[in-house]
Image (tube, helix red, strand yellow):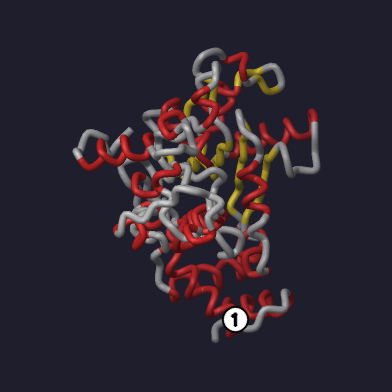
Amino acid sequence: MDESQSKLEKALEIRGISRRDFLKYVGMLGVMTGLSESAILKSLAQAAEKGGSGKLPVVWLNGQDCTGCTISLAGSLNPPVASLILDKLSIRYHETIMAASGEVAEEAYKEALKKGGYLLVVEGSIPEADDRFCMIGGRPFKEIVKEAAAKASMIVAVGACASFGGIPASTPSRGMGVKKLLPEKTVVNLSTCPVHPDHLVGTILQVLVTGKAPELDENGRPKIYFGPSVHDNCRRRSYFDASMFLKDWNDPAQKDYCLFEKGCKGPNVNSDCPIRRWNDGLNFCIDCGAGCQGCSDPTFYSKMTPLYTSEGEVSRKIWARKQAGLIPAKV
């Protein structure tokens, strides 16, 4: 064992994490990121050796949002090994979680911009209709995003709103995603509502290990997370194939039936929700008895409404158009 690995072992011991448990977690991270276990171990060992100097600076901006993505990420700080990885980040600016406020906070933001080389995370959409829908410190949010993007080493849009506009896109503000504002930039879209903490932690881990973003699909989403269809991996799939659709929410005999005719968008969207699940792998929308709302899709929310239907007309129309090749891959 070399010196850097020894320091990593000590860092784990301080946090009460056994080597065996850590190796199991590294294996899971390998599946999450597509990286080899040896590459992850080497990177974390080097980070432990560097100490504080190895931290990745992060500037996190909030626009038209509900702060749900921040809350979702905060929920990923358990088990402690996740904290070990996040300890390698230096959150230079985040309106919600930073201790500073007012002029002190703004000075921290300006200092981060001056140094550059940070990971820019944007939460919430950007108003396209009128800048006055989202002003921060008397400045249009649109202007702040452009300013911060200029010296960022990488840009990550977290959640449906920052990725493609989300719910605000259907409001008078006509909220838009970061990529639409910055078409010339590479933007990693993590487009569930809210962002899945594993998607964000896994993306950050890949940046730390490889220095580059994961492979993206035609909509700027990491293929490893948004490649599989929700429908294909749904435990109710067999009921869909058998045309056994839920008709009555109050009938216990139908409790496991396919929710397609109640508005489930699972056949029309791509995300690993059925495999990865939410709340530390506990559950996800469809297993809770609610249809998939399609929050990972670029057309969410405007083209996915109503979320619940009596005859599944919206789901059927989208499914028919998709099967006929009338829905473009890129939106």
Name the residue rendered at 50%, 45% in the picture: 192
Picture layout, residue 32 above or below residue 322: below
Q: Quadrant of residue 304?
A: top left
Is residue 320 visible in the rendered image? The answer is yes
**Residue at 34% across / 63% down in the picture?**
238
Residue 319: name its quadrant.
top left
Q: How many marks?
A: 1
The N terminus sits in image quarter: bottom right
In this rendering, the answer to whether 125 lies above or below 200 is: above
For the point 44% across and 75% down, the residue is 37
Neighbour class for label 1 at 10 Å: few (<14), some, many (≥20)?
Answer: few
Q: Which residue is mark 1?
A: 21
Location of residue 269 in the rendering, given as x and y in whole percent from the top left corner: 37, 46
Closer to the camera, 256 or 290?
256
Q: Is residue 243 left or right of residue 175?
A: left
Q: Amino acid at mark 1?
A: Asp
Residue 294 x %, y %? 44, 43
Q: Residue at x 60, y 39 (%)?
A: 115
Query: Which quadrant would the C terminus be assigned to in this image?
Result: top left
- Res. 117 visible in picture: no
Left or right of 222 on screen, residue 208: right
Q: Secondary structure at mark 1?
A: helix
Query: Residue 211: horizontal and vertical position, in percent?
Result: 44, 55
